[in-house]
Image (cartoon, grey):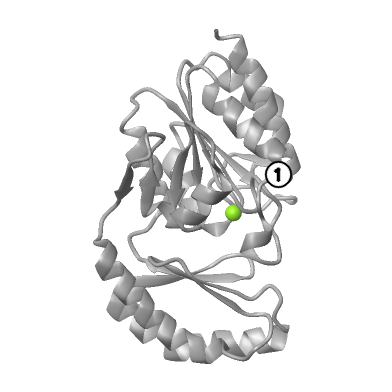
Amino acid sequence: MSNPVQGRAQLRKLMQKEERIFLFLDYDGTLVPLAATPEQASPPDRLLETLGGLCLSPGLRVAVVSGRGIDDLKSFLPVPGLYLVGVHGLVIRYPTGEEAWRNGERGEIRARVNKLARKLEPLVGGKKGFLLENKNIALALHYRLALPQEAVEVMRRICEEVRPLLQESGFIMRSGKKVLEFCPAWANKGDAVNFLLSDWPGALPVYVGDDETDEDAFRAVAGKGLGILVSQHPRPTAARYRFTGPGEVALFLAEMIRDREYLL
Ligand SMILES: [Mg+2]
């Protein structure tokens, strides 16, 4: 774990001659700025055009890898040719429209999620600024708009009252940026990346992400590909490179489309 370096030009050079690149992109905080609520983070038209352009580029496969549910991703990103990976790698939607569930029965996971939701609801019910999002196979508790003191109190009660149930259900709690996520312990962005890569031998993986859950994917591509952390300031990470924010990611993607054109 070290501080990543900034260097778009260096990255472009490394990718220039690669015949196959599998580009993995996180969504929130990477392709779009973090928003107060999940539905406010809808993609601008320009981003959809860029993703469409990337999917048409020669020798390039593109996946959006997110903690969001797959339905959310489908409605936000109606881009032909795009792979969608939802709930931290648990569900994969192929460009053909086929969906694959990785490890686990849909119905069984759903039942466990609902049980957890029933436990969490009374802890946040009636409190301002909390949003409990049921993604059917995972739960997210957003507290960006909550009063800090109230958020601390809710976290304390969750640790005391919900932790035992998590263990019993095989779920883990991950903390993100003003969000707590409850998802199956086996959901892991790094595993999903490896799974997709195994389908396309020889491809160079490039992973761009901003959050703690992206670290699994940075570790998965370390040594065989390029990990790019999106963060305004340097911080310890398994990624080797850093972009300052979604604005720089957009520049990088536009440059990539131009660079790939020369391969034609
Ligand atoms: Mg993110």
Q: Secondary structure at mark 1?
A: loop
Q: Is residue 5 visible?
A: no
| Whether residue 71 is situated above or below residue 246 in the rendered picture | below
- For the image, the number of numbered tags is 1
Q: Which of the two residues, 230 or 78, is positioned nearer the viewer here? A: 78
In x, y percent, where is residue 206?
52, 34
Residue for point 73% across, 32% down = 251
In x, y percent, where is residue 187?
37, 58
Q: Quadrant of residue 200?
A: top left
- 233 lies left or right of 74: right
Three-letter code, disc 1: Pro
Q: Is residue 254 visible?
A: yes
Q: Quadrant of residue 241?
A: top right
| Whether residue 204 is situated above or below residue 123 in the rendered picture | above
Which quadrant of the render holds ligand 1? bottom right
Residue where numbered disc 1 is placed: 44
In x, y percent, where is residue 198?
31, 33
| Whether residue 175 is situated above or below residue 248 in the rendered picture | below
Q: Residues within 10 Å of mark 1 (few under 14, many from 20)?
A: few
In x, y percent, where is residue 3?
64, 47
Residue for point 37% across, 22% down = 202
Q: Which of the two residues, 162 or 85, is positioned nearer the viewer here? A: 85
Residue for point 62% across, 80% down = 130
| Whether residue 58 is situated above or below residue 174 in the rendered picture | above
Q: Which of the two residues, 222 or 182, is positioned nearer the viewer here? A: 182
- 39 lies left or right of 248: left
Residue for point 44% across, 47% down = 85
Task: For ligand 1, tell me if the residue under mark 1 lies within 8 Å.
Answer: no
